[in-house]
């Protein structure tokens, strides 16, 4: 089974992202826009079965 890569917002852990409008048509953008917190930048890449892990780690990190 092929593993699916999921992109996660490093700020809020959301997987709800879109490509910023100003990047449309410029090839493959590495920058994504978070649909929840508005973060723009590079997202964390995670295996689909590790999404929860990554989100939990983010939560820990953001507690500080
Ligand atoms: Zn976010």
Image: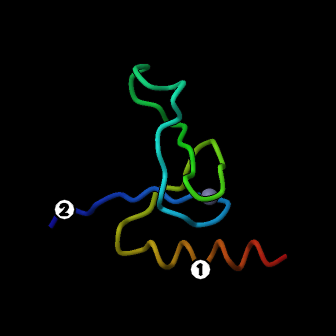
Q: Determine which of the numbered discs, if any, sits on residue 2 in the image.
A: 2
Residue 39: percent from left, percent from top: 66, 49
Q: Out of 11 and 49, give the one closest to the viewer.
A: 11
Element type where label 2 sits in the image? loop
- Do tag 1 and tag 2 residues touch (Cβ < 8 Å)? no
Label 1 Cα crowd, 10 Å radius (few <14 / some 14-19 / many 20+): few
3 left or right of 22 in image: left
Compute the Cα span from label 1 to label 2. Answer: 24 Å
Q: Is residue 31 above or below residue 64?
A: above
Looking at the image, tell me whether mark 1 or mark 2 is earlier in sequence order: 2
Residue picked out by circle 1:
56
50 left or right of 2 in image: right
Residue 16: percent from left, percent from top: 47, 58
Residue 2: percent from left, percent from top: 19, 62
Query: In which quarter of the view is residue 31 placed?
Result: top right
Label 2 Cα crowd, 10 Å radius (few <14 / some 14-19 / many 20+): few
Judge depth for marks 1 and 2 and give the one in front: 1
Q: Out of 30 and 39, give the one closest to the viewer.
A: 39
Question: Could you tell me which residue is drawn at 38 percent across and 65 percent down?
Answer: 47
Q: Is residue 9 above or below residue 31?
A: below
């Amino acid at each position: 089974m092929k593993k699916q890569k999921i992109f996660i917002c490093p700020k809020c852990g959301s997987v709800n992202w879109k490509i910023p409008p100003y990047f449309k048509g410029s090839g493959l953008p590495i920058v994504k826009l978070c649909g929840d917190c508005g973060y723009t930048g590079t997202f964390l890449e995670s295996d689909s079965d590790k999404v929860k892990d990554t989100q939990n780690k983010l939560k820990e990190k953001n507690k500080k």
